Amino acid sequence: MNESLSFYATPGTFTSLGDHSKLLDSLPRNISALCGIIQGVMLHIFWADRYGVQLDAMRREEVQVQAVSRQLGRITALDPRPLDMPREPERRLVGNCRDFSVMLTHDDLATLDQVAALTRGDAHKYARVRQLCLSDERLRVPATIHSYVEGGMRTEDLEHLQP
């Protein structure tokens, strides 16, 4: 694996699982299912009211818990069941878009489906990541990326972009 891929494939301070790696053992092996699981254990801070959850100051502060190991610790403190069991909204970790993205693109989760997971960014960055990943047969980055943005779905064709 080249040096760039190796760097990005290694968990850092915010993405290390710490003592929580066993929580991933029973999870399914596809991105679609993982999205549902993350939505079942996390609650977006700006959507709490829509779920009928009134957040006090302490619960709103959960959005500041940025390290994945601490987030997993809080998720299991709120509800110790396996991660693939959805929680009631009031028993989910309060987070924001960054937290959902980091949790989903965490290397140990994303590679369950052997897919290089990407968070938001411009298409040229995606194209660069795809170019790096083409040299590693363990990773697949599609030629077209679909992302959901305000106002609908955005599609980027990476084949024709220069990184």
Image: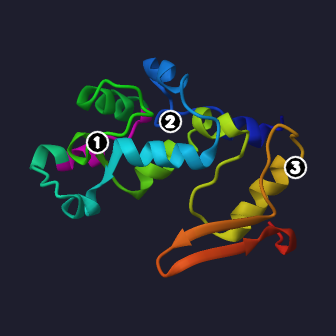
Residue 15: mark: 2
Name the residue rendered at 58%, 75% in the picture: 153
Residue under pointer 1: 92
In which quadrant of the rendered image does the C terminus lie? bottom right
Q: Nearer the viewer, mark 2 or mark 1?
A: 1
Q: Amino acid at mark 2?
A: Thr
Based on the picture, tell me whether residue 62 belongs to the magenta stretch: yes
Is 60 on the left-hand or right-hand side of 143? left
Q: Along the polypeptide, which appears first: circle 1 or circle 3?
A: 1
Is 23 on the left-hand or right-hand side of 8? left
Q: Amino acid at mark 1?
A: Arg
Give the SS element for disc 3. loop
Dividing the picture into quadrants, the one containing residue 20 is: top left
Q: Along the polypeptide, which appears first: circle 2 or circle 3?
A: 2
Q: Nearer the viewer, mark 1 or mark 3?
A: 1
Query: For the magenta stretch, what is the residue range?
Result: 60-68
